Image (tube, rainbow, N blue to C red):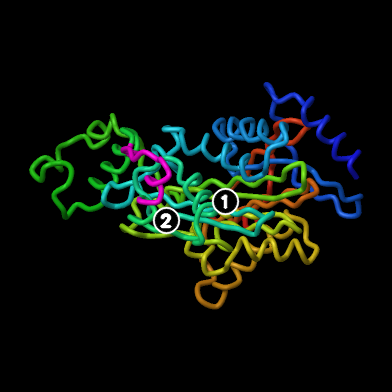
Amino acid sequence: MENNITRRRFIFKTAAAGAFTLPLIPGYSRPGKVKEITPMIITSHSNQTGQDAMVAGWEVLKNGGSAVDAAEKAANVIESDPEDTSVGLGGLPNENGVVQLDASFMDGKTYSAGAVACLEGIRNPSSVAKLVMQRSDHVLLVGQGALEFAKAHGFTQENLLTEKARKIWLRWKEELSDDDDWGIPEHLKDITDKEAYFRDFPEIEYHYGTTNVLAVDMYGNVAGCTTTSGLSFKLNGRVGDSPIIGAGLYVDNEVGAAGATGRGEDVIKSCASYYIVLKMKKGLSPQEACEDALKMIAGKYKNVNPTFFPSEKFVAINKYGDIGCASMKGEGHPLMSVMTSSGLKKYEGKTVYPERR
């Protein structure tokens, strides 16, 4: 066993992690093959920032670092991108124009978890969640308490509302109703070119903005984090699934990990990430488990509102190189970024109900 570990270390330290092309790989699983630990890191973000995050996280893994540290490193890259309106710095604010962040962290090796919710002014909530996991006997801190904890550990509070996010929020505010006093003066509404009025403002973005990062290290330990600015223009104090262990994130060191993005209310009610990991434990591949979870959620509404299919996307990994990604509805296929010793790739998942919009 010691020789195998040493050989794996050698492979990691000599694997190149420079510039990679991004081949698109279809969903896959490998039932029946000899099970061997496959170090890897994945994120639900498939854009350039997500790819940069994978390179940063892999640098930790290939040098023998832990899955926990790799997941944090990758998440911080995404949270610190001011152009990304779904997390951290630049995340879209709540209805009052205040950026409130949620995040969770889980370490499969120690069966520990930490989370923060409604955290204001700290761009890397995933790092605060990690410290809640490692430096307290609690799992979830909220609001002012989460902020005090972050400051006690050296985090500096800053204004997270970028100019881009502020303009998106302000446009939403002005277009919300014709019956309030925001926007074009009443006597000019019928003669003003509305398109010209908003020419310097970005289009309104309505999303549930979240990112998941899941990792397996060379020792076979699994960890993950989920981080978000939450539902755009949400009610003040709203908490989604991201900081809820078992909903937005779950890790089992014997099996793997899963994370969720999308409408958090449905993910919370279904304990979706725990459900996915449990299904993997019972023999489903990560891809099959993600799809099964979406079908389960859709089925809950069958007798309530059969036309309701909430927007969800799930990602999952196991310890042996199998990965999964699935979304509830819409055109195209959900994507995520994946990095292993073979390089950086985009993984193409499956849309379970493509006919639904």
The amino acid type of the residue labelled 1 equals Gly
Q: Report which quarter residue 44 is drawn in.
A: top right
- Residue 70, image x, y percentages: 63, 39
Q: Amino acid at mark 2?
A: Ala
Disc 1 crowd, CA 10 A, few/some/many (<14, 14-19, 20+): some
Q: Residue at x 57, y 41 (%)?
A: 72
Asked if the stretch drawn in magenta spans residue 23, the answer is no
When the figure is inspected, residue 49 is found, relative to residue 290, above or below; the finding is: above
Q: Which mark is residue 330?
A: 1
Residue 309 location, x and y as percent? 54, 62
Q: Quadrant of residue 8?
A: top right
Q: Which residues are magenta?
A: 148-161
Compared with 235, 298 (above or below) is below
Label 1 and label 2: CA atoms lie apart by 29 Å
Is label 1 in a helix, a strand or a loop? Answer: loop
Q: Is residue 214 left or right of residue 170?
A: right
Specify whether residue 155 is painted magenta. Answer: yes
Residue at figure coordinates x 81%, y 34% from the top left: 9
Instruction: In the displayed orientation, state which residue is furthest to the bottom.
Output: 303
Q: Is residue 189 left or right of residue 288?
A: left
Q: Is residue 151 visible?
A: yes
Horizontally, residue 173 falls left or right of residue 66, namely left
At 35% from the left and 48% from the top, the residue drawn is 120
